[in-house]
Amino acid sequence: MRKSVAKAPKKRRLKQQRGAGNAIFDVMNVTAFVVFTLLCIFPFYYLFINTISDNELVSRGAVTIFPIGINISNYIALKDVNDLANAFLVTVTRTILGTGLMVIASGLAGYLVTKRALWHRSFWYRAIVITMYFNAGLIPWYLNMMMLGLTNSYLAYIIPAIIAPFNIILVKTYIESIPKELEESAIIDGATTLVIFRKIIWPLSKPILATIAIFGAVGNWNSFQDSLILMKGAPELYTLQHRLYVYLQKSSDLKAVMGGGAGTAMVLENALNAKVVKYTISMATIIPIMLIYPFMQRYFVKGIMLGAVKG
Amino acid sequence: MKEVNNNLKKAKTPKIHMTSSLILYGAVRVLSLCAFIFMFFADLNPGRISLWINKNISLFTTGISFSDLTTRFAALFRQGVVDRSTFELLSIASTMVIIGIIACCIGACMSMGNNRMKSRGIWLPLAGSVTMIAGLAGIYLSYSQLSAVAERVQVNFPSGFYWYAALAILIFVITVIILVFKRPAAVEKKMAMPEKYSLFLMLLPILLLTFVFCYLPLWGWRYAFYDYTAGETLSADKFVGFEWFSMLFTNSATINDVTRVLTNTFAMSGLGILVSWVPMVFAVFLNEIRSTRFKRIVQTLTTIPNFISWVLIYAIALAIFNSEGLFNSVLSLFGVTSSTNWLMNADNIWIKMLLWGMWKGLGWSAIIYIAAITGIDPQLYEAATIDGAGRFQRMWYITLPSLLPTYLVLLLLTVAGFLSNGLEQYLVFQNANNKDVIEVLDLYVFNIGIDGGRIPLSTVIGMAKSLISIALLFLVNKVSKIIRGESII
């Protein structure tokens, strides 16, 4: 506000130009946003038309804006790619299980830390929250997982993901906004903590639980680091993203081709066009996210704003 | 602990006795908790009576999964070298230890209730510790059976056995003492527990998981003081003190590496901070568009890339920038024939990474500002308009200042995360050509630690990073307290 006083003389000059300036600004503004928006979605479209076009043309770089020679043979060819069905199964089950357990745990933890009666409440809450900002580092984490016997084990996808401090904060913040009277009347009726949680808190916090469920599901679906680091000796437990990463690296890194395992490489190399198969796998991995995207969208802002309360 | 005293209603024993009974119950609780956590430690598996048993399985797995326990023994069973019953005994004995531990834990939980619950619950650790001892005896029996073929299967007496034996005996002794001297009279009619403890017990599983996955890794910092190569076990003679730390400052190859990696990290984080205002401006300009529908579409579509993983983004980048990709096709329209695979090109990689990062995150980062703009009081705009402020002045003097607090918080958090660029983006874009300029600290730790197997050095670097990061966080928190009057964490 102090600034506006200091710069007062400038005001008048701007005001005189307003009419024309406004219009030019509007046009430029809209154009800029249109361009950026196209920039955001065109790559996905481009990848998609590559997968449904004639492979011969794709390999010559002829497909640019419109698909040519539309066919879905690439998608049908996916069933012949080794390990893909397995990776898909691993990813889907971990997404469902991991997200489900995470939502239940975050819901319960978020509820319990709102209870003033909890023994040393703020200490435990802080102990959970501080792990968001501080961690021991990648290698100690890996050694810890090894010590717990969670390398090359499916459980490594599920158990560590149960704890999500940020989601606990979100749920806690949300539950604090629910009127206390509802809970109190239930206590008078003799309901126990778990019954209150199940019958009152859980249904009332559905919006926030849906939010964290969606974020958790996307996170699980996209997860790749844990598979990469922990599953070195168990290719059958690779997630979809990890499998795709392995495929993508096959041609772009000479070293990987030399040292890579024979089994999966063979199928790709023998395929009519390994490159397009890779694109097709990528597209097949993107599509589920695109499908749930319309549902997630309305939860974005809520999640972000609640999170912003705590930085 | 004082509160527990008050909860022992009608207890007539003198205060000194109360304290001693508290210590005894506390000991049972702590010991049971230890046993419970140990159960999931592969290092402390008392059932690993042969080095052929997978060293990554814990007592819990030993007890519940016979197939995991005997993965390498199938052939030996067939040849008759090892008797199958030995391992069945081992498996059953391990299950007994697990059941014993769980009984102890339930008893320990019940000891937090009222006198009636306490006096009932105390039988559980007694039974549990006896079961544990019986199970351990079973393990010992199978160990002595297996000793007959010691050479073939590398029979080994697991060090974890002593830990469990000690825990079981201690729990047993303490429980007996409690039963004989301190067992409270069951004066209440019903079993009950003070609310604060029942709530705590419900939270306990989550706290345990947090401890095991977030705090326990700190124990791995000890590797920084040992000369350790992956796959070995730590032993005292491998202790090297601060050698790895001094190596960071004396070994010229390491110094070169670390300097290079830090340059990359600082460059990319620095660039990130330089453009950190862009999402805010994005939101301010988007707000100037009148059509709500257009705004919503832009917001929706620009957020999509945020939900796509870096691996998939790399796939897209490959489609566009490979030698036959869109980028080269577009270039040929302008008469430039090129068959470069642009992803292999290391020029300006910092800028490229920044642009990819912005492409992925800009729309998403703008959401928080868009939400903040809707929270601005419309009266401010009205008043400004009446005072003769034009559109740009309103943007400059009202919208932007209203967003600055949010921007400041996010900027401070970005500064706190200066050393943490993340791993995935740089990992997927990394190749032989650009490795020198793309390797940020996180990627470097991954490359030398996980891929290169240089555990101690990467632990040292990770330690330094964690400590600097937490120091930075406290610093920016202090800064925030000074300039905004409130903390950000």
Image: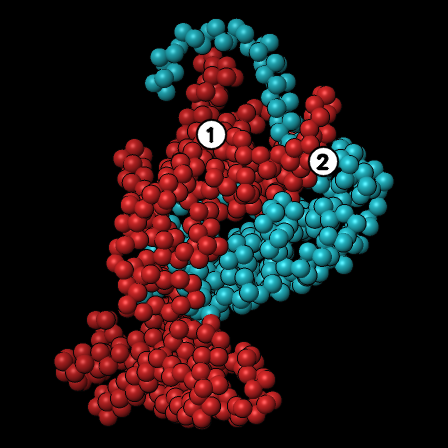
Chain colours: A cyan, B red
Q: What x and y, as percent, mark residue B86?
A: 49, 91
Specify the subunit that label 1 lies on: B
Q: Does residue B188 show up?
A: no
Disc 2 crowd, CA 10 A, few/some/many (<14, 14-19, 20+)? many
Which residue sits furthest right? A69
Earlier sequence position, callout 1 versus callout 2: 1
Q: Is residue B130 above or below residue B299?
A: below
User: Element under label 1?
Assistant: loop
**Viewer-nearest residue: A211 or B282:** B282
Which residue was labeled with disc 2?
Answer: B324
Q: Is residue B105 above or below residue B256?
A: below
Q: Is residue A215 above or below residue B290?
A: below
Q: Amino acid at mark 2?
A: Glu
Residue B298, quarter of the rendered image: top right
Q: Does residue B399 show up?
A: yes
Do the residues at pointers 1 and 2 share their chain? yes
Q: What x and y, as percent, mark residue A36?
A: 62, 29
Specify the subunit that label 2 lies on: B
Residue sitting at x 82%, y 50%: A73
Disc 1 crowd, CA 10 A, few/some/many (<14, 14-19, 20+)? few
Count of number-bearing discs: 2
Which residue was labeled with disc 1?
Answer: B275
**Viewer-nearest residue: B399 or A284:** A284
Question: Disc 1 and disc 2: Cα gap in Å?
Answer: 32 Å
* Quadrant into which the N terminus of chain B falls: bottom left
Q: Amino acid at mark 1?
A: Val
Residue sitting at x 71%, y 57%: A266
**Viewer-nearest residue: A1 or B361:** B361
Q: What x and y, as percent, mark residue A43?
A: 67, 37
